[in-house]
Image (cartoon, rainbow, N blue to C red):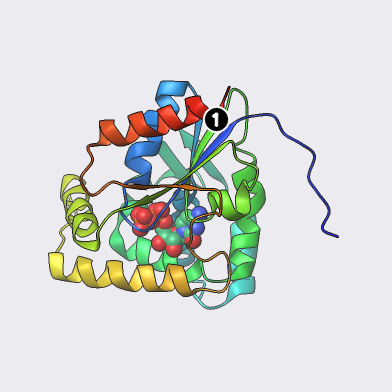
């Protein structure tokens, strides 16, 4: 029998979904509305990816990547993400880093190395965690599990806008291709593949504004939290 972790009453809302489905955009206002902490788990994978470029670690050397991750000094403070003392908030948003993050995320050793760091975000009064496996692997006992979807065209358009706003250049055809590749890798990998938890509520955000998506999640949370 698997050892069970002690019961933790701190509420968690998990928001999982594919690339550019709006997880981060929706998770931040949900957390702010409830006064909860926020975990952008993708940022951890992106930080690991950036570090692998910086310290020349091969994307297929799972053991070396896990050792590297254990040694990283990471801080998230007031919108600023630091890696080993340097502000990398913008750098980690580059597509090149996102693609590398998706590539290294296939390794079970890499995923394992990030588990404790992710669970440490669960603090009172509560947590909103977004990613791919928040409801299935990291917080299987979450209070509310949401799975966000949107058509690939809507997601590519959103990602294009986001990259332009951050000052990166972007081409729609390349973005669509990368998105499809990343979807395929995220859904087909053996370790923690992208899929809704059995008890997740699915929300298609293709035709929804950010406010509408946030409202729906807050409503669901009010329903489960009697
Ligand atoms: O921006 P995008 O939605 O593409 O990705 P992200 O949430 O910033 O995460 C970057 C990559 O890390 C994703 O493409 C996933 O492959 C991986 N990831 C993961 O495997 N598990 C998570 N919980 C979060 C991200």
| Direction from residue 53 to residue 118 in the image, left or right | right
Kind of element beneath mark 1 = helix
Q: Nearer the viewer, residue 205 or 112?
A: 205
Q: What x and y, as percent, mark residue 214? A: 34, 32
| Direction from residue 175 to residue 60 in the image, left or right | right
Residue that label 1 marks: 224
Q: What x and y, as percent, mark residue 137? A: 61, 55
Query: Is residue 45 among what the camera can see?
Result: no
Q: Residue at x 50, y 65 (%)?
A: 55
Circle 1 Cα neighbour tier, 10 Å, few/some/many (<14 / 14–19 / ≥20)? few
Tell me where residue 177 sits by quadrant: bottom left
Q: What x and y, as percent, mark residue 53? A: 43, 66
Q: Nearer the viewer, residue 31 or 77?
A: 31
Which quadrant of the figure contains the N terminus? bottom right
| Direction from residue 116 to residue 151 in the image, left or right | left
Q: Residue at x 33, y 73 (%)?
A: 181
The answer to whether mark 1 is within 8 Å of ligand 1 is no
Which quadrant of the figure contains the C terminus? top right
Q: What x and y, as percent, mark residue 23? A: 37, 45
Tell me where residue 174 sits by quadrant: bottom left
In the rendered view, tell whether residue 192 sits above or below residue 88.
below
In the rendered view, tell whether residue 78 sits above or below residue 152.
above
How many numbered marks appear?
1
Query: Is residue 144 among what the camera can see?
Result: yes
Q: Residue at x 57, y 77 (%)?
A: 61
- Give ligand 1's quarter of the image: bottom left
């Amino acid at each position: 029998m698997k050892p069970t972790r002690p019961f933790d009453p701190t509420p968690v809302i998990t928001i999982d979904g594919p690339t550019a489905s709006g997880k981060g955009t929706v998770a931040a206002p949900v957390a702010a509305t409830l006064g909860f902490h926020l975990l952008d788990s993708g940022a951890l994978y992106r930080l690991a990816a950036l570090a692998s470029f910086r310290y020349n670690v091969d994307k297929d050397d799972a053991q070396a990547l896990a050792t590297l991750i254990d040694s990283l000094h990471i801080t998230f403070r007031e919108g600023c993400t630091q890696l080993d003392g340097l502000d990398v908030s913008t750098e980690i948003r580059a597509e090149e880093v996102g693609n590398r993050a998706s590539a290294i995320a296939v390794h079970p050793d890499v995923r394992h190395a990030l588990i404790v760091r992710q669970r440490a975000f669960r603090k009172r009064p509560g947590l909103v965690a977004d990613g791919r496996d928040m409801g299935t692997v990291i917080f299987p006992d979450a209070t509310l599990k949401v799975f966000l979807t949107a058509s690939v065209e809507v997601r590519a358009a959103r990602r294009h806008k986001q990259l332009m706003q951050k000052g990166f250049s972007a081409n729609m055809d390349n973005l669509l291709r990368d998105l499809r590749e990343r979807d395929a890798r995220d859904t087909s990998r053996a370790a923690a593949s992208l899929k809704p938890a059995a008890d997740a509520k699915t929300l298609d955000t293709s035709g929804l504004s950010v406010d509408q998506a946030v409202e729906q999640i807050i409503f669901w949370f009010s329903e489960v939290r009697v």
